[in-house]
Image (cartoon, rainbow, N blue to C red):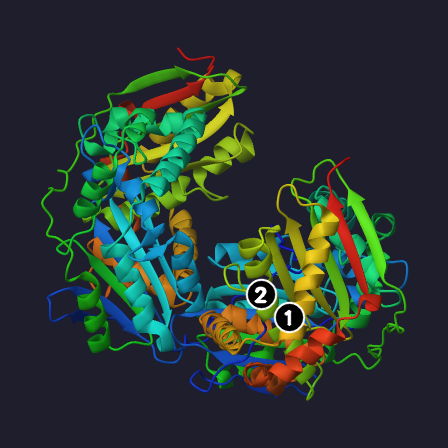
Amino acid sequence: MKIIKPLSLSLALAFATPLHAEIDIQPVTTDQGFTAWLSEERSIPFVAIELIFPGGANLDPDGAEGAVALMIDLLSEGAGELDAQDYAAALESLAGGVSFSAGRDSVSLTIRALTENRDAVVDLARLALMEPRFDEGSLARARAQQLSSLERAARNPNTIASRAFNEMAYDGHPYARATDGTSETVADLTREDITAAHQTALTRDRVLVGAAGDISADELGVILDRLLAELPEATTPLPDYADFTAPPGVTVIPHDGPQSVIAFGHAGLPRDDDDFMAAFLMNEIFGGGRFGTRLMTELRETRGLTYGVGTSLASAAHGDSFQGRLSTENARVGEVVQLLRDEWEWLASGSITEEDLARIKTYLTGAYPLRFEGNGSIASILASMQFQGFDIDYVNIRNDLVRDVTLEDIHRVSERVIQPDALHFVIVGQPQGLD
Amino acid sequence: MGLLIRLVPAIALVLALALPAAARAPQQFTLDNGLELVVIEDRRAPVVTQMIWYRVGAADEPAGLSGIAHYLEHLMFKATETMEQGEFSATVEAQGGRDNAFTSWDYTAYHQRVAADRLELMMQMEADRMVNLRLDRSDWLPERAVILEERGQVLESRPEAVFNEQMRAALFQNHPYGIPIIGWRHEMELLDDVIAEDFYRIHYAPNNAVLVIAGDVDADHALELAQRHYGPIPANADLPPRTRPQEPPHHAERRLTLRDARVGQPYVNRMYLAPNRRSGDQREAAAFQVLAGLLGGSAQTSVLERRLTYDEGVSLSAWAGYMGTSLDHGVFSLGVMPAPGVDMQEAEDALDRVLAEFIENGVDMDQLERVRMQLRAALIYEQDSATARARTIGAALTTGLTLDDSEGWIDILQDITPDEILAAARQLDRRASVTGWLMGEE
């Protein structure tokens, strides 16, 4: 048997890196004044278009929470002359895709069309957007589905913890409410609520567009004007930026079961903060939800206290937090809470090393390009970049921004953001060992 | 480690298509040691996929050692001369990449997707484990428990999967396509490091492999890297020819019933022995592929769904599928899930009646146009993913097809006539089939 000597592992770095692809993004303005970012790529004859309408469930009136989410479900249930099945069949015979989704901060429309069928698919998307039927029968069915999903959620300790955490963290702000509404509000939603949500959440002056594939800027402009020109103007204001309102302390919500769910956190950083990238790297090292982070090593691998633990820099459009989540046996909750406080102290006292930082840069710069998996994901990223307020060249400089973060930056931001005494813990279960 | 093994090909149409003129054609090279290299340039984003395909799979296993190809696939993530066990995947992960592997009857493949500037590291590690695997420094015994557990989880605990295994075992009377990829449990329990090592030494060699590099890479650069890392590995001069026992003519229809309390929705499935795609001679296979598209390629508009589900209300769903990208034989399948109140025999009779009517009435040209468009669409959407293209080409080159066959497939599909489709439908011979009923307990 011959052993082949492999070249040294460091060799890959010794060769000059050849020039690698950049994502070429052009800004587009249509005749009607809509704007979009386009990555034109003619080699494959189809286009993906992603539209984000900022607002989302935040725009639900008090007492009608869940209206936007339910309305979005109903957009796929028939439009114009077509019932739900006819609509699905029409899309399928064009091999196209038109889908809607709703979230707390936005709703989105995703379109995929072959070049040969592009106009017909866009017409179907326009029909769903402008002329949804909102049949009473479909409404009753979708409402029943949403109610049954809310009932399941109400018994799920993870959902209970999230909702309680949000209620305390964003008191008096739409972020304190549930995106899908409550059993009471959804049961009372009428066709009028749904039509009102349709007028409120899909407006011509709040739309961000990303497109990728076989389409020119001019062609995209024509499509967007046809799709969007007849949408109404926005009349409902977007929410103000939320203050983080949860006081330090522990809230226990009794719930049967062998384990407790713990949601914890304090205020974070707005995403346009100059220290955001440093804070992002800090979090990836500390609790980014993968193996090898500080929290996974300390809580899972060293002590076997949990299956998984993660923290996130939750910097959203209208509010922020630095928060985390895990489950553990009821008997060990006291130990876990103390350990988390200790880890917060560890992070606040500047314990991250150059080696930690180098490792996370290797990982993050390697993982980033994998997000660009074809036209659909590129279109979606382009729309999302606008929603998050990034510049048009961000995707091409992002890895440089990661590499530029220094250990000093990390320590500065840890000291600034991480506040062990400010932590609030929401514990859902039968916890033991708490002081 | 998170290996994802595709044990059972999806029932739905698996479309293997080539590319239209618009996209850049893949380039092919052969190294002196016999390694074939295919480069698919896709410069849209700085990311690249490496896939190495070995021309060995479950149908190449020695008698009595079923499961060895898949077991070896697991063991390939263990120690080598230069790496500790688990280090391969840990390195890919540390670089922000993803890796995985899968085994079929005709091939075993390993792949990584990484930022384009990290391709060379991947090639170096993959070349290393082509020759330097060290099972004597690896925990091979616990890994056998892992594959047995996997068999329990993905197969034995799912009546649908057991049913499929039994159907294939009944369909193939002589060819090892009737043996499950993961292996029969009693034979898996006998596998060990010596058997795995023998299998590895025979089949893992550059002259039995196809390397596919897809993504943000220049073809010449990929060739240079392949020569640097795979080039020094000697060919296996004793590589055995790939001959498997072939099917004799079938004379008798087979039927089976599997009852299991866990079955939620009973259904009827039928598998027919069918032609496979053959190099330079793919029209017959293409006719079966288009036939499957017409009969069952769409949840909304295909012949079976429209008649059985929407018009007659006999079924909850009905399907047709064709698996022809294989070295020796293809399989055509039909199935129906009866609507509540419809019994299994009624549903099966209705399925056969609709098939007979289809043959009697001929092909609806509007529908054929729609299926052609959907086949084109599947191809176009597939090209959006360099990884998917790499999969299609790798599967073709390890099942006896050439790159030209693979690239020409879509044009052949578009060119298939109604006469050829009906000829394929008439070839579906009950004597070369097995019909199964999967049902709950009585």
Same subunit: marks 1 and 2: yes
For residue B123, above or below residue B238? above
Rate crowding at label 1 as few (under 14), some (14 to 19) or many (20 or more) other CA atoms within 10 Å: some
Q: Residue sitting at 17 percent across and 31 percent down?
A: A243
Q: Classify A255 as above or below B427.
A: above
Name the residue at 52% across, 78% down: B365
Q: Mark 2 is on which residue type?
A: Val
- The residue at which mark 2 appears reads as B303
Q: Where is residue A241 in the image (x, y as percent from the top left)?
A: 15, 38
For label 1, the residue is B358
Checking the image for residue A144, the label placed there is none
Q: B90 and A311: which one is in front?
A: A311
| Foreground pick, B13 / A290 | B13
Q: Which of marks 1 and 2 is nearer the N terminus?
A: 2
Callout 2 secondary element: helix
The quadrant in which residue A179 appears is top left
Answer left or right for B282 relative to A395: right
Q: Which chain carries label 2?
A: B
> Which quadrant of the figure contains the C terminus of chain B?
top right
- The residue sitting at 30% across, 33% down in the picture is A348
Q: Provide residue A230's location: percent of width, then percent of height.
A: 15, 59
**Residue B434, visible in the rendered structure:** yes
Q: Do the residues labelled 1 and 2 touch (CB within 8 Å)?
A: yes
Q: Is residue B103 visible?
A: no
- The residue at 26%/63% (across/down) is A210
Badge 2 local density, few (<14 within 10 Å), some, or many (20+)?
A: many
Q: Which chain carries label 1?
A: B
Q: Where is residue A55 drawn, in percent x and y? A: 20, 45
